[in-house]
Amino acid sequence: MFSAVARRAVAQSTQCAARRSLTTSMRSFQQVNTSPGSPVTSQPVKANATTEPVLPEVKDEVKRINEIPEEPTPKKKKFSFTGFLFKTLFFTSVVYGATLYVATKNDKVMDFVLDNNLPYSEELIDLIETGSVQQLQKSLGRLPQNIKLPSKDQIDELAHKIEKGGETLIKETKSKFGQSSKYTTPEEQLQKPVEVESVGNVIEKLPMIRLKDGLSDYADETVKGTIASFNDLIALVDASNIGSKKDGLIKNINENVHALTSKLVKLSNSLEEELQKKLKTTQTELLSAYTQKELELTQNLLDQFNHEKSNLEKKYQARVTEEVEAAKKAITQAAVNATTMVRVEQTKKFESMIKQKIDDEREGRLKNLNALNNRVEDLEKYAQALEEQAVAANNRGVIQLSITKLKSLIFATEANTPAKFLTPYIARIGDATTKSNDEVFSLALNELKPLLENESNQSILSIPQLLTAWEQLTPELRSASLLPPNAGLLGHVASVIFSKFLLPVKGNKPDGKDIESVIARVNLSLVRGQLDVAVEEVANLKGWSRQLADDWVKEARVRLEAEFLVGLIDVESKIM
C-alpha cells in the first residue's frame, strides 16, 4: 500500500513538473513580437525567431506522462451490519464449541461449565463424547424424511387463495385510483370557473297533522276538531297572515284542548274503574283455580304417600321376616354347637377318668412293669452296641488282613514269586469299609483304585529295584550333563566319551548342584530307604537329564503313593 502511494506521488510530481515546463515552453513559443504603439490585431502573430524550439525529449516525456493511467483510489469498504453479526456469531460458536471440547478433556474447565450452567452444555458435551460421523450421517439421512412436501390439494388451495387475494388487491387498487381521479389538484381547482347557484323565492310549507289510516275511524269528534284547529294554525303560520284571526284561533284551540283534557280525564277514570273490576274478577278466578289446584296436588301427594307407605311396609315386613329366619337359624346352630361342645367336654372328662383309672390299676398291679421295660431297653442298647463293636472288629480284622496281604505283595515280594493282581485286595478293603461311612477310607480308596488298577506285585518296583534302575541310569545322566545346547551327533559321542573320565563322588554333599553330587545324594537316600528325598532330588533336575529320569520318577512316585495310601488306610483302621 505504501509503495503504491509513493509511486502515485512521484508520478503526480513528475506530471506537474512536465506540465509546468510545457506551459513555459508554449508561452515562449507563442510570445508576440510587437513594437510599442503598434496595434494588436486578432490575426495570428508569428513568434519571435529567436525563441528556443521545444526539445523532442520533452514532448515524448509529456506524452508518456499523459498516457500513464492514474491508479484508481481504493474505495473504502462500507460497514455491513449483517457481516459483522455473522462474523460475531461464527466466532462465538467456535469459541463455545472449543470450550465444551476442552471441558471433555480438562476437569477444571468442566467444573467451570457446570458451575455457570452454560446453555445446551450437557447435550453438546454428550454429542462430543458419544457422537460419531455415522450418527451424523444418519441424522442427515433422516432429515429429508422429516421434511414433508405439501400435497396437491394444499398447493391448489394455496394457489386459489393467492389468485383470490390478487383479484381483491386489483379491485382495491382500481377503486383507489378511481376515487383519486375524482379529486383535483389545487391548480386545477383555481383554473375552474366560479359557479354561482341561483336560489329562487320558494317557501316550503309546514306539513299538516293527519291521522293514520287505521286510526281515523276510531277517533272521536273532539280529537278531529283539535287536529283541525292545529292544521288551521299551521296554515295561518305558512300564510303569515295571522293578524285578525289570531284571537279566535287561539280561543278555539284552547276550547278544543280543554275538551280533550276533560275527555282524557273521564277516559282514564273509566279505564281505571274497568281495570279494578277486571282485577277483582281475575283475582277471584285465580284464587278459585289456586284452591282447586292445591286440593288436587294435596290429593296426589296423599295418594303417593299411601302408595310409598304400603311399599315400605311390604319391604320392611319382608326384611323382618328374613332377619327372623336368619336369627332362628343362628340360634339353632349355636344351640347345636353348644350341645356338641358339651358332648366333647364330657367325652374328654370320661376319657381322662378312664385313663386315670387305668393308671391307678397299673400302678397297683403292674408296679414293676416300667422298671422291667427300662431294663429291657438297656439290654437292647447294650446288645446293639456289642453287635456294632463285633461288626467293627470283624471289619477291622478284614481290613488289617487285607492291608497286611497288600503290604506283603507290594513291599516284600521276592523275585521268584508269581505275579498277582492287587485289585481283589483293594475291593475287599472297600467292601469292609462301606458300612463305616468314613470319608478317609472313601478318599483313600478312590485314589488307590486307579493307581493300582492294572498293577501286580511284580509291576511295582521295590527300593532295591529302584536303586538298580538308578545305577543303570547314572551313565546316561553323566553324559547328558556334558551335552552342549543344541548338541548333534558329535556332541552326544563326545559327551559319552568324556563321561567315562568323570570321577564319582562319595558321601552326601547338600550344597552341590553338579550331576555327581545329585547322583551321590540319590544313592545315599535310596540306601537309607528315603525314597521321597530321592524322588525330590531327581525331580529337580533340568533339561535332558530330567527327561532321561522321567520314567524312573514315575515308577518311584507310584511306589510312594501306594505306600502313603496303604499306610493311611492302616492307621485309620486301627482307630475306627
Image: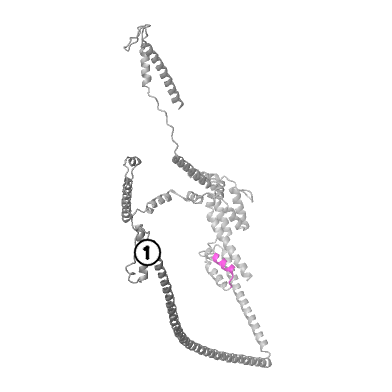
Q: Is residue 514 above or below residue 572?
A: above
Q: In the rendered view of the protein, which quadrant contains the N terminus?
A: top left
* Horizontal side of residue 370 vs 538, given as left or right: right
- Dominant secondary structure of the residues highlighted in magenta in the image: helix
Could you say which is closer to the camera, residue 388 or residue 347?
Answer: 347
Visible in this render: residue 180?
yes
Visible in this render: residue 411?
no
* Horizontal side of residue 116 vs 226, given as left or right: right
Q: Is residue 14 above or below residue 567?
A: above
Q: Quadrant of residue 437?
A: bottom right
Residue at (52% x, 67% y) in the render: 423
Residue at (61% x, 72% y) in the render: 396
Residue 465, percent across and down? 56, 58
Residue 480, percent across and down? 53, 48
Could you say which is closer to the camera, residue 260 or residue 528?
Answer: 260
> Does the magenta portion include 446?
yes
> Does the magenta portion include 367?
no
Q: Residues within 10 Å of mark 1 (few under 14, many from 20)?
A: some
| Three-letter code, disc 1 | Phe
Which color mode does the image show? Answer: one colour
Mark 1 — residue?
230
Residue at (38% x, 19% y) in the render: 65
For the residue labelled by badge 1, is the local secondary structure a helix, a strand or a loop?
helix
Could you say which is closer to the camera, residue 228 or residue 413?
Answer: 228
Q: Quadrant of residue 35?
A: top left
Residue 30, percent across and down? 36, 12
Residue 76, percent across and down? 44, 32
Look at the image and give the residue range highlighted in magenta.
436-448
Q: In the rendered view of the protein, which quadrant contains the C terminus?
A: bottom right
Could you say which is closer to the camera, residue 431 or residue 407?
Answer: 431
